[in-house]
Amino acid sequence: MDKSFIATILKLAGITIICAVINILLYQLPQLQEQATTFTYSVATIYMLFFGFSVIILFALNLIAKNDATQVGYVFLGLTSLKVVGSYFLVEPILTKTISYPAERINFFAVFMLFLFIEAYFTAVLLNKKQ
């Protein structure tokens, strides 16, 4: 692994930790604390899963960029599509659960969008890197 990939993973880990801590602290507020106890997946579990997905995607993109940089965009789209399918299977119990609070659904999709944005950003950086 090269230094730029390790730096990317460290940046991803830093962003993940900061956002996860903020999210966990948000659910410590008295208004939201009761809702967090009914979550199917804990906030930390969701962040760890999406962090794992992102590391796998960024690792694959880094390998592809070294071999054939013209295919990075296609690989990103394919892996992101697989992530969406995997995320559906994770969110399905949340969507079918009868709850009176939408906080769990909103939280899951917000974390999903956060990591999608992060992956798109690092992919754009990888594509714009001088070969």
Image (cartoon, grey):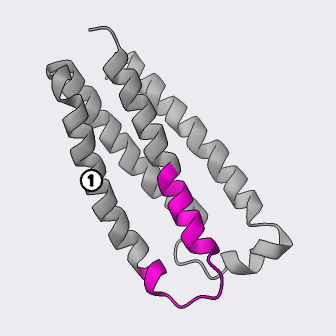
Amino acid type indicated by mark 1: Ser
Indicate the quadrant containing the C terminus: top left, top right, bottom left or bottom right: top left
Q: Is residue 27 left or right of residue 118?
A: right
Indicate the quadrant containing the N terminus: top left, top right, bottom left or bottom right: top left
Residue 69 sits in which quadrant?
top left
Residue 86 sits in which quadrant?
bottom left
Q: Position of residue 4 (x, y in %)?
A: 40, 18
Asked if residue 61 is positioned above or below residue 55 in the image, the reply reads above
Region of the chain picked out in magenta, as a range: 93-113
Q: Position of residue 128 (x, y in %)?
A: 35, 17
Crowding at dot 1, Cα within 10 Å, few <14 / some 14-19 / many 20+, comes out as few
Q: Main secondary structure of the magenta part?
A: helix
For the residue pair 28 and 125, the one nearer the viewer reads as 125
Residue 42 in view here: no
For the residue pair 53 and 75, the one nearer the viewer reads as 75
Residue shown at 17% from the left, 23% from the top: 70
Residue shown at 53% from the left, 91% from the top: 98
Residue furthest right in the image: 30
Q: Is residue 24 left or right of residue 114?
A: right
Asked if residue 25 is positioned above or below residue 30 in the image, the reply reads above
Residue shown at 49% from the left, 87% from the top: 97
Magenta segment includes 95: yes
Q: Position of residue 35 (x, y in %)?
A: 69, 79
- Residue placed under numbered mark 1 in the picture: 81
Magenta segment includes 15: no
Asked if residue 17 is positioned above or below residue 12 in the image, the reply reads below
For the residue pair 46 and 124, the one nearer the viewer reads as 124
